[in-house]
């Protein structure tokens, strides 16, 4: 594409600061930045981790600062003593809260505001905020695709908090911060947490809940594609305040996802049972109602949330990221899922 | 009692009836047109005004298809039918739509090339063109907002004749009373305006006569063949009253729309015109366009939340109304009730339809904000005033199709054509299944809503069928 050549690339900074460094995405990201692959870079790489998080899985080169996005003082420590350009990649967030749905607002929204404030105080050169599809809700029809600029229509508590996070970023941009946003839907790949492993187990046992005809469409993002999107958003000169969908090239149907995972498991020598768990669409609607009601009461039950969401279409168009950032996803579902499964096996995780 | 005699009785004089009458008369058939509404010369009433609604629409402008939500719809009721009062925006039937109809409904001799060549004729006849001069502010708003979002938008040509270099409001609408009806008259056709068809008299498979009323008096008409072109609501009602039932009035298709009003810093309201720009970024699912924005209609559009929106009515010159239309998966039913003048119309939106209406309205609000709207007033009960993107989020979360003023102007598919008898009410050329000489030739024949303004599709199909009729029966 000719547009790619017109993009202006920025040099890597002296300092790269990553929040949520011990999280799923953060781990993959700092591993790529500190490694010697395509996205490896020099300079200081500093990561924010919470006190209770383990860090033995992170590269030694990464300087770790213990703190929390909900604690502004700890964020100032994150920038202490850095000289030269600073880029900030804000990956910290919570998807499935442990105690109460209040965590959504405290961590995703207020936490983002705190990170933006700290970045501004530290004079950051460029900030990339990792947003989500959830501020935008769901597509009304299966063949609808979210364009790059869409109205907010947040899906439940998580969506509300990620929308407020985006608004906090835009406010900071208004105050002079050079921040942009990437919006990955449902990401997958190595370093994935246990709940995603459950997904493999369900498919293996033929018990993944397919609602209705399973023709719902979902965009997904392989972690390497996401790392590429984040780095390009960081290092491509654009107007502040923009946001881009970062996902695999095309969305998948739920049936396609389940079949691909089944094939990938078989290719690794697993015995995969044919999927038998076909539920009426109504089950999804009921799960969504329960999820909505429990979230209103401040509680969060992962199973209902996931099942309620399985009935939705969340499909995005990545052409703006291709155009503005030169983003070009290299991995699609079959390869991505196979890599994820191999990673799980390599970690000694039982599927 | 008055009696008329003719070869072919054409019921209705809109996009279907007027073209049918012209083609048949020019082929030598003795054509009589029966029109329920009056003959109104253009310029006699102001376009898109309440006076026009009163005079040229059925039931003073608004009729309702019952359902959750109910859908308000409008039908032209005058010589020339909907072509006299609609937005005048011309869209050829999309090629993929033609192909889908052909295969899904087994429509014979329904060739894309033939239809498109008829479209070319129609474009010539109606002088279909873009605005040579300046656009109205409401057109500029739609274009500006969509351009800033990078959303595909286009000026839609219209059937208008303009003086050289004229602006959008200076054209003359090339409606049926200016085009195909004069052609029909020149070839000997006659028209009876303000004549309502009461009954079709049948002997088995044949219709042998019609009974009508005019100014309280009875009129009888005898004919060889009858072509019903009363539009998607009246055509099935007429057929049902004549005892035809098979697939008649069972599959009403519409493009449901939701609306909003937007207030700008300067005067933008053009009472007698609508935006000629449409946004097709999300087509065929969702399209955006401009609605008639006469002050009375502005007031109507603000009534959904009058407590918060009412104050805006005094600044109506700064307001314009826009719609988001969807292609619907739902279908409706047109059912006559003995002893009742108008049929009962019901329509059911599917969940997808309701979701798309919400998504469409939110996206439309984005276009308005990007075009520098100061405030946006969405047309649904309890809607918030929208001033920024965070407000759109509040709006999207409180939207439900059941609270919205859903309306439509594109009605079709109540007597679908095709050789697939299980799905269709008429054969591939409009002859009603189970009849020897009763034809349909209007929007009722389109098997689905076409996803674009349908008048060109209606005219192309009607001309095709009329020519086929002439090939089979010498005048």
Image: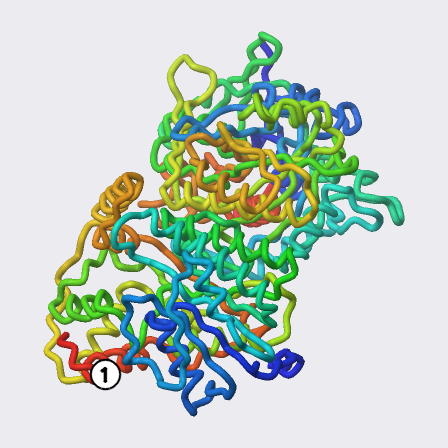
Residue A315 position (above or below residue B450)? below
Question: Relative to A239, is B268 on the left or the right?
Answer: right
Q: Residue furthest bottom?
A: A36
Question: Relative to B49, is A186 on the left or the right?
Answer: left
Q: Residue furthest right?
A: B164
Q: Position of residue A144 (x, y in %)?
A: 45, 56
Question: Chain for mark 1?
Answer: A
Residue B432 position (above or below residue A209)? above
Q: Position of residue B4 (x, y in %)?
A: 60, 20
Question: Relative to A118, is B172 on the left or the right?
Answer: right
Q: Quadrant of residue A169?
A: bottom right
Q: Look at the image and tell me whether residue B228 can be seen.
A: no
Q: Quadrant of residue B79?
A: top right
Choose between A267 and B97: the one closer to the eye: A267
Question: Relative to A163, is A285 on the left or the right?
Answer: left
Residue B12 position (above or below residue A183)? above
Q: Quadrant of residue A97?
A: bottom left
Q: Position of residue A176 (x, y in %)?
A: 65, 61
């Amino acid at each position: 594409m000719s547009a790619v050549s017109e993009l202006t690339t920025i040099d890597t900074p002296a300092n790269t600061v990553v929040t949520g460094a011990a999280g799923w995405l953060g781990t993959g990201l700092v591993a790529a930045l500190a490694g010697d692959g395509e996205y490896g870079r020099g300079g200081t790489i500093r990561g924010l981790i919470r006190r209770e998080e383990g860090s033995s899985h992170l590269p030694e080169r990464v300087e770790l600062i213990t703190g929390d996005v909900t604690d502004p003082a700890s964020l100032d420590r994150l920038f202490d003593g850095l000289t030269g350009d600073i880029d900030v990649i804000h990956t910290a967030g919570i998807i499935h809260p442990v105690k109460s749905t209040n965590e959504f607002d405290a961590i995703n929204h207020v936490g983002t505001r705190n990170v933006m404030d700290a970045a501004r105080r530290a004079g950051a050169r460029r900030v990339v905020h990792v947003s989500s599809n959830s501020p935008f809700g769901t597509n009304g029809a299966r063949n609808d695709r979210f364009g790059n600029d869409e109205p907010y229509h947040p899906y439940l508590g998580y969506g509300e908090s990620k929308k407020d996070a985006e608004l906090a970023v835009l406010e900071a941009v208004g105050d002079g911060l050079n921040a942009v946003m990437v919006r990955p839907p449902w990401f997958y790949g190595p370093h994935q947490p246990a709940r995603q492993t459950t997904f493999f187990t369900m498919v293996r046992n033929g018990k993944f809940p397919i609602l209705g005809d399973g023709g719902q469409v979902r965009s997904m993002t392989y972690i390497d594609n996401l790392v590429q999107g984040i780095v390009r958003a960081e290092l491509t000169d654009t107007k502040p305040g923009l946001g881009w969908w970062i996902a695999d090239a095309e969305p998948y149907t739920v049936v396609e996802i389940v079949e691909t995972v089944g094939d990938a498991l078989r290719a690794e020598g697993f015995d995969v049972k044919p999927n038998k768990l076909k539920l009426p669409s109504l089950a999804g609607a009921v799960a969504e109602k329960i999820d909505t009601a429990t979230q209103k009461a401040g509680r969060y039950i992962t199973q209902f949330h996931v099942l309620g969401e399985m009935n939705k279409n969340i499909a995005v168009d990545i052409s703006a990221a291709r155009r503005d950032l030169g983003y070009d996803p290299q991995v699609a579902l079959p390869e991505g899922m196979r890599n994820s499964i191999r990673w799980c096996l390599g970690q000694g995780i039982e599927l | 009692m008055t009696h008329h005699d003719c070869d072919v009785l054409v019921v209705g004089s809109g996009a279907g009836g007027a073209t049918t009458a012209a083609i048949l008369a020019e082929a030598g058939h003795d054509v009589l047109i029966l029109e329920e509404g009056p003959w109104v010369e253009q310029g006699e009433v102001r376009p898109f005004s309440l006076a026009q609604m009163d005079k040229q629409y059925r039931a003073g402008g608004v009729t309702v298809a019952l359902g959750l939500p109910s859908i308000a719809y409008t039908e032209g009721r005058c010589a020339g039918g909907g072509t006299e009062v609609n937005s005048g925006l011309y869209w050829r039937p999309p090629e993929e739509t033609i192909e889908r109809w052909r295969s899904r409904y087994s429509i014979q001799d329904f060739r894309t090339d033939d239809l498109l060549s008829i479209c070319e004729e129609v474009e010539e006849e109606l002088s279909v063109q873009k605005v040579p001069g300046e656009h109205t502010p409401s057109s500029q708003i739609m274009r500006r907002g969509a351009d800033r979002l990078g959303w595909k938008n286009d000026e839609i040509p219209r059937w208008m004749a303009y003086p050289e270099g004229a602006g959008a409001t200076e054209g003359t609408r090339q409606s049926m009373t200016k085009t195909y009806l004069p052609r029909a008259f020149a070839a000997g056709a006659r028209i009876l305006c303000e004549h309502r068809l009461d009954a079709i008299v049948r002997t088995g498979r044949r219709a042998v006569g019609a009974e009508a009323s005019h100014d309280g008096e009875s009129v009888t008409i005898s004919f060889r063949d009858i072509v019903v072109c009363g539009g998607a609501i009246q055509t099935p009602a007429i057929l049902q009253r004549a005892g035809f039932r098979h697939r008649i009035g069972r599959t009403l298709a519409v493009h449901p729309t939701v609306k909003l009003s937007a207030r700008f810093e300067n005067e933008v309201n053009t009472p007698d015109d609508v935006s000629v720009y449409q946004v097709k970024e999300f087509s065929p699912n969702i399209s955006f366009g401009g609605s008639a924005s006469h002050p009375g209609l502005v007031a109507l559009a603000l009534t959904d939340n009058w407590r918060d929106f009412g104050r805006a009515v005094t600044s109506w010159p700064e307001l314009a109304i826009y719609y988001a239309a969807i292609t619907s998966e739902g279908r409706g039913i047109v059912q006559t009730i003995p002893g009742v003048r108008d049929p009962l119309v019901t329509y059911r939106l599917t969940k997808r339809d309701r979701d798309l209406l919400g998504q469409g309205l939110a996206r439309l609000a984005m276009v308005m904000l990007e075009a520098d709207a100061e405030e946006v007033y969405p047309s649904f009960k309890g809607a918030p005033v929208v001033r920024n993107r965070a407000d759109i989020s509040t709006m999207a979360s409180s939207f439900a199709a059941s609270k919205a003023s859903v309306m439509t102007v594109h009605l079709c598919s109540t007597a679908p054509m095709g050789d697939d008898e299980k799905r269709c009410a008429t054969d591939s050329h409009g002859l009603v299944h189970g009849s020897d000489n009763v034809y349909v030739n209007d929007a009722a024949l389109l098997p689905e809503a076409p996803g674009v303004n349908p008048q060109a599709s209606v005219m192309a199909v009607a001309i095709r069928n009329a020519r086929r009729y002439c090939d089979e029966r010498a005048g």
